[in-house]
Image (spheres, rainbow, N blue to C red):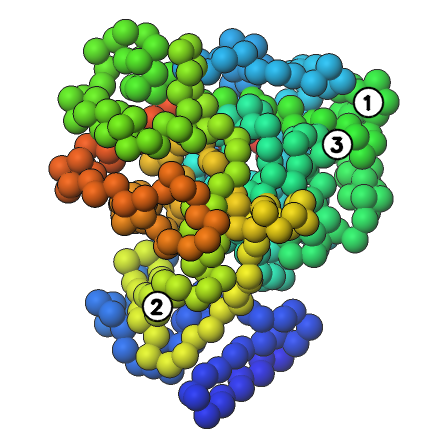
């Protein structure tokens, strides 16, 4: 493998691996640390990585999770063409953790939607695809994804069965050149022998592959949070601060988009709005130099120019082609939100405090900004109570869903 280091007058540098494109940002940052020689609060010696033990788990009844959803969630609309069965869910779980479904056998669905990280990815603002290729959007958390009427940040799909082909075929994600290549990979894997025939009358097809993965994802239902038990169950399960935070949430108008109904709450209306983030990034606003994380507890502020790939993300416009949809993004659900940083479509906010600060100051005013977004003028006390409320939206079965996911074997080449 040939490394080419190019130093230019700025000074700036880029590192490329022959045939693989730009190397991963974290490796570039590590080499940058060696060149710059200045770490922000970094120790003299790098911490030693610990050995990660094999992760195991126990299968749970995700079928029961779908048919009898936890408190705070309604019955799920299941497509007539794809009724839920335990065999489909088990097969979908197996596929979800199979690295062989990427073109070079390196990447599974679960590597961007990590169960222990809220079925998203906490360590990176946006995921890294096959061969370190840049992905411009944050990995959406998959909790309660079966309830969503629009999928992806721009709503380009409305069916989980169809949605799966986007990451499987995208050049910068799993990079398969065709549907046929994916199906052939599964056909030639001995551990899938007979499984599709047992789960589906028609056996393995492009449609049944989508049905299996959709079935597993529909089982990732999470509710019965402290808020649910207080609001829908009349239990004394919510702290006084969280109750006050609910009032702040409601009075500030957050509930207009992150909706709560009489008998259930999705905390999303699945609509699309311009909240200012897409505009700010496109206009280069708020792109100040930030620390680069090298390892847990070790960050540097680069002392030379360190440029990463930048994408001008136009949001829903990319799914519709309508100019009125420029910089509109889907409202995410707030269930389990405390578990799923970083936030916004580009992962630009690392914590909930940053998200609240953005809305508290009224985002970045510009033509097209949703008119409901105005300065909230919340006090520090109100912000702390709002955080308590958001933390109360964590479901009671998160650990159970993690354990269920780790009952699947990792499909390796």
How crowded pointer 2 is (Cα within 10 Å; few <14, some 14-19, many 20+) is rated as: few
Say left or right for 94 vs 270: right
Q: How many numbered discs sit on the rendered protein?
A: 3
Q: Which residue lies under the disc numbered 2?
A: 288
| Spatial separation of the CA atoms under disc 2 and disc 3 | 43 Å
Q: In terms of secondary structure, where does tag 1 sit? A: helix
Q: In terms of secondary structure, where does tag 2 sit? A: loop
| Spatial separation of the CA atoms under disc 3 and disc 1 | 12 Å
Q: Which circle's residue, 2 or 1, is located before the other in the chain?
A: 1
Is 335 placed above or below 178 here?
above
Q: In terms of secondary structure, where does tag 3 sit? A: helix
Can the viewer see residue 404?
Answer: no
Q: Which residue lies under the disc numbered 3?
A: 209
Residue 270, x across and y down, in percent: 52, 31
Q: Which of marks 2 and 3 is in front?
A: 2
Q: Which residue is drawn at 49% across and 69% down?
A: 308
Q: Which residue is drawn at 32% across and 8% down?
A: 233
Q: Among all residues in the image, which is located at the extreme top? A: 234
Along the viewing direction, whichever of 150 and 300 lies nearer the viewer? 150
Say left or right for 33 vs 326: left
The tag on residue 157 is: none
Residue 172's quadrant in the figure?
Answer: bottom right
Q: Residue at x 40, y 47 (%)?
A: 342
């Amino acid at each position: 493998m040939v490394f080419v280091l190019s130093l230019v007058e700025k000074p700036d540098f880029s590192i490329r691996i022959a045939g693989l494109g730009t190397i991963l940002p974290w490796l570039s940052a590590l080499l940058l640390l060696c060149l710059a020689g200045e770490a922000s609060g970094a120790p003299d010696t790098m911490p030693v990585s610990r050995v990660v033990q094999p992760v195991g788990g126990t299968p749970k009844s995700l079928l029961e999770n779908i048919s009898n959803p936890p408190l705070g969630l309604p019955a799920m609309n299941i497509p007539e063409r794809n009724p839920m069965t335990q065999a489909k869910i088990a097969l979908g779980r197996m596929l979800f953790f199979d690295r062989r479904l990427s073109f070079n056998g390196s990447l599974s669905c679960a590597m961007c939607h990590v169960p222990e990280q809220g079925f998203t990815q906490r360590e990176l603002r946006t995921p890294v695809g096959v061969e370190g290729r840049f992905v411009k959007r944050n990995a959406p958390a998959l909790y309660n994804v079966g309830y969503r009427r629009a999928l992806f940040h721009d709503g380009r799909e409305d069916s989980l069965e169809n949605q799966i082909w986007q990451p499987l075929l995208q050049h910068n994600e799993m990079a398969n050149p065709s549907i046929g290549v994916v199906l052939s990979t599964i056909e030639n894997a001995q551990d899938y022998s007979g499984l599709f025939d047992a789960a589906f009358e028609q056996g393995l097809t492009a449609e049944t592959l989508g049905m299996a993965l959709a079935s597993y994802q529909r089982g990732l239902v999470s509710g019965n949070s402290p808020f649910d038990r207080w609001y829908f169950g009349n239990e004394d399960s919510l702290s006084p601060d969280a109750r006050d935070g609910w009032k702040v949430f409601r009075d500030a108008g957050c509930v207009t988009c992150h909706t709560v109904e009489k008998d259930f709450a999705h905390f999303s209306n699945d609509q699309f709005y311009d909240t200012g983030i897409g505009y700010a990034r496109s206009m280069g606003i708020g792109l100040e130099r930030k620390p680069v994380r090298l390892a847990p507890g070790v960050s540097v502020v680069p002392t030379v120019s360190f440029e990463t790939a930048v994408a001008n993300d136009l949001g829903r416009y990319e799914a519709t082609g309508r100019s009125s949809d420029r910089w509109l993004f889907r409202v995410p659900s707030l269930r389990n939100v405390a578990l799923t940083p970083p936030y916004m479509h580009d992962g630009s906010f690392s914590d909930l405090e940053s998200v609240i600060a953005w809305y508290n100051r009224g985002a970045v005013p510009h033509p097209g900004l949703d008119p409901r977004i105005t300065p909230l003028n919340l006090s520090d006390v109100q912000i702390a109570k709002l955080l308590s409320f958001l933390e109360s939206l964590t479901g009671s079965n998160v650990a159970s869903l993690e354990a269920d996911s780790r009952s699947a074997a990792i499909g390796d080449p």
